[in-house]
Amino acid sequence: MNANTDFRICPESGLKIHRPAEALIKANAVLAVVFLLVGGVLGLLVGLTRWPEVHLLPADAFYKVLTGHGINVLIFWIIFFEVAVLHFASAVLLNSRMATPKLGWASTGLMLVGALLNNYAVLVKGNSSVMMTSYVPLPADTLFYVGLILFAVGALIHCFIFLGTLVIARGERTYEGSLPLVSFGALVACIIAIFTIASGAVILIPTLAWNLGLISHVDPGVYRLIWWAFGHSSQQINVATHVSIWYLTAALLFGAKPLSEKVSRFAFFLYIAVLQIASAHHLLVDPGLSAEWKIFNTSYAMYLAVMASMVHGLTVPGSIEAAQRAHGLNSGFFEWLRKAPWGNPVFSAMFLSLVGFGVLGGITGVVMGTEQINLVIHNTMYVPGHFHGTVVVGTTLAFMGITYWLVPVLFRRDLILKGVARWQPYVFAAGMSGVALFLMGAGTLGVPRRHWDILFSSAGAGNGYEFSAAALTLMSLNGLSAVLAALGGAMYIGVVVGSILFGRKLAENEKVGTLMVRAAPPAEKYHNIGMGTITIPGTMVLVGVFFVAFALYYFINWKFLAETWGLS
Amino acid sequence: MQDDDKDQPFMQKVLDNHFLLLFIGLAVPTLTYIVWGVMELVSLPIANP
């Protein structure tokens, strides 16, 4: 049989799975987990060094480890996993054959070579401790840039393969009408990825030429501008991807359908149009860029993207609530939530991701994106606190959750250590939420983000800097939280790798034994749910709490700013 | 989008046109963020110490 027509039927979902696509998805997912392991170990070392009482690593090792941590988790783990999600959301969810699987393998190979070269430059040669941002004129090893460029080219080819698969699926009519919402979300992630990678190429190729001595210099201002179109937009790929995973999880575990597909699609459209420009908040104190440019690209236009995220934050739990009520859990405000499958890590990880991303990452992102109050926390520990809320509690936890569903479905292995898997999202979410909160607290008190020695204790007598006891306590709590998060990460890797290697093999048509896909409730069951005319009263209460917290936190930061100058 | 479906609302047609979405996703940030930003940076006067 021709490989392009080689399909199997998933016994859980009835999906027609293209075997070459499945193999490529599995390879990218495994590579993602390997780089998460590398980046996670390095992250623990960063956390232990920032713990004032421990201060584990010397300065040179710290910057090397921090560089490796940032690139391995923010780029390699995330993008390998996103490639897997792109092909899953196209070939698998659309019951289609994948476009050019062999080119897909070549692209994954290119990404792997790039990731290895970059790690070799950072961790083995040790001459590329330029941190993830690699701002010029800080010089890194040539292999550092070559590795990043090869990785980006591989990822870009995967994006075009994804688009090719959509064309095939439409041409062969493997789905009816519009693209399903989860696949549409993946398309949005792909579009943002193409902008992101193109921006990376635009700035990294001249930087490589400068590194090789072919051009005399790269303007630092232009570098920062374009690098952040790559560096921050890469995190917007994550947002579109993990929001798609939220919708997927709601559909799989509850048979939930979006409250309004039109509204959800329009929210995704806003991501396409205006999400990437949020990169500008990194440049809010850069000279040379006007207030008009800064305010348009952060406050005015970015708020449309913030609104889109809030739409998803309403419709995902809202669709779960509506489905749960239609399944009969219709009492009071929160029976649907209390009786949700909290022991199923696929759900708990997804819901913790949703809450963490919205509250820890979302609210604080708006504070950072407002030009005036950004000044209170710019380039402090608040920044890594914020993105550990978005990228780790939000994206990584969502990816972890869907892995527990994918291991039996794609790898055909039963999960081992189910008790560990049940607790893992809680341990990881608790640890990483602590990291996010305590770093943001320390940042609000002025602790800088990039310095190895925040007290300047190595600068000699009389040159040190005394932070308040509260700031130092927060940094210690961050260290403890990093240890807890590392434990949660180790639990995830132990369960997933252990299951793939040693889990019981499932026969091709064997079901897992636990409910993997729940049928949607019949349409008539949606009649008369909720309280009075409000269909989703519980979600509306949660949204109300969110808005109150949002408003209070926003104005507290204006108060912090007002206290900076003694005008009153 | 099914090609023979001409009665869809305009916005639905936009959302179903994947390559138009790709164009929008590339054009908007390229213009408002990169082109506008680079124009501001390159128009800065050179310092004369």
Image: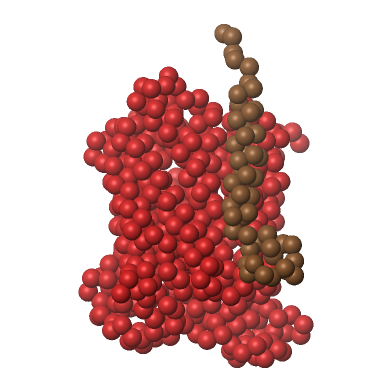
Q: Quadrant of residue A4?
A: bottom left
Give percent across and percent down for residue A281.
59, 41
Task: Look at the image and give the colour of chain B.
Answer: brown
Left or right placement of residue A386 versus residue A484 in this view = right
Q: What residue do we see at 39% from left, 38% from top? A: A131
The answer to whether residue A359 is above or below residue A220 is below
Give percent across and percent down for residue A468.
50, 41
Note whether residue A297 is visible.
yes
Q: What residue do we see at 53% from left, 81% from top? A: A254
The quarter in which the N terminus of chain A is drawn is: bottom left
Front residue (pair A169, A425): A169
The quarter in which the C terminus of chain A is drawn is: top right
The count of marks equals: 0
Left or right placement of residue A552 versus residue A49 in this view = right
Q: What residue do we see at 74% from left, 62% from top? A: B10
Note whether residue A55 is visible.
no
The answer to whether residue A193 is above or below residue A348 is above
Residue extending furthest toward the top: B49
Task: Look at the image and give the colour of chain A.
Answer: red
Front residue (pair A164, A43): A164
Q: How is the image coloured?
A: by chain
Q: Quadrant of residue A147?
A: top left
Give percent across and percent down for residue B34.
60, 36
The answer to whether residue A425 is above or below residue A530 is above
Give percent across and percent down for residue B13.
69, 63
Q: Quadrant of residue A399?
A: bottom left
Q: What residue do we see at 39% from left, 81% from top? A: A9
